[in-house]
Image: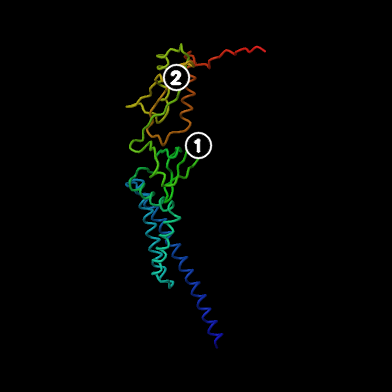
Amino acid sequence: MNELLEDMMHHISVLRIAESILIVAAVAVISLWGSRLIERRVMRLSSLDSSLRVMLAKLSQGLLITIAVLITLPVIGVDTTFLSVIGGALGVGLGFGLQKIASNYVSGFIILLDRSVRLGDLVTVDGRKGVVTHMEARYAVLKNPDGTEYVIPNENFVTGVVVNHTLNDRIGSIHVSIWLAHDADLRKTIEVLSPIPQKHAGVMAEPHHPAVQVNQVSEIGIEILLSWWMQDLALVDPALRPQILLESIEALREADIPLAKRPEYPVSAHAG
């Protein structure tokens, strides 16, 4: 008789565990599906700022998962009072070993709230320059023009120095440097180089027009800077600058404007 009762209890406990696993799995799938659905809908709200959309999506995901956990635990027979114990243990863990992780999560929400960095911004942080393509709870992803992607912890955006090239104004300047010979006609150089950037899409004509300036004079020659302004620095084609430099050199040669040459230093002779 006792063995029969033990078998029944064992069968009931196994059945209860299986039911609990199925309930947890079902709630997890539903909550994840719901969070993805909310995220897609929020990200389509073009009337909201991109950073605000990301923040609302993350908050809604966290809230939905929290509600799912609070609903699931009593259903499977787990006393929710143990959450206070887990919360205390988690607090101790954060105090000792998870400071960086907690700091990155908090920094992520700070960035989204103050909107100092937004999706699509061109930024330089920790010496790495790129366009912000993803903003997650713990990190942000910067994409370099050559395709390289940098995963930057959110804490670096809050505690470090961040150069946001497109924070308040997305226009910005780009320049190329060309060295000319000392006897080059500078005024003719300006006439030849000034129209070249305007042939390319995205280059502004007004109010900032391309400019040619003398930067310095040295024993090598005269350094000329050809600069132009773009409507959106984050959308600049990486091939644009080399292309304009190539066209500038070709135009200078066609106009018979001499480029600088490396000076030849006399070789000293040593008696043997």
Residues at discs 1 and 2 in contact (Cβ within 8 Å): no
Please identify the quadrant where the C terminus is shown.
Answer: top right
Residue beneath the point at 38% across and 63% down: 67
Residue 5 image point, x, y percent: 53, 84
Q: As shown in the figure, which amino acid type bears the numbered disc 2?
A: Glu
Residue behind mark 1: 146
Q: Residue furthest front?
A: 272
Sequence-wise, the earlier of marks 1 and 2 is 1
Residue 179 lies, with reference to residue 5, above or below; the image says: above
The number of numbered discs placed on residues in the rendered structure image is 2
Please identify the quadrant where the N terminus is shown.
Answer: bottom right
Please name whichever residue, 200 or 59, is drawn nearer the observer in this view of the structure.
Answer: 59
Q: Residues within 10 Å of mark 2 (few under 14, many from 20)?
A: many
Please name whichever residue, 104 or 78, is drawn nearer the observer in this view of the structure.
Answer: 104
Q: Which mark is residue 85?
A: none
Residue 127 lies, with reference to residue 5, above or below; the image says: above
Question: What colour scheme was applied to this rendering of the protein?
Answer: rainbow
Residue 232 lies, with reference to residue 220, above or below; the image says: below
Distance (Cα) linking label 1 and label 2: 28 Å
Q: Nearer the viewer, mark 1 or mark 2?
A: 2
Please name whichever residue, 101 or 172, is drawn nearer the observer in this view of the structure.
Answer: 101
Residue 27 image point, x, y percent: 43, 65
Residue 38 image point, x, y percent: 38, 55
Residue beneath the point at 43% across and 12% down: 185
Specify the quadrant of the image occupied by residue 89. bottom left
Residue beneath the point at 42% across and 60% down: 92
Q: Residues within 10 Å of mark 1 (few under 14, many from 20)?
A: few
Q: Secondary structure at mark 2?
A: strand
Q: As shown in the figure, which amino acid type bears the numbered disc 1?
A: Asp
Residue 14 image point, x, y percent: 52, 75
Residue behind mark 2: 223
Q: Secondary structure at mark 1?
A: loop
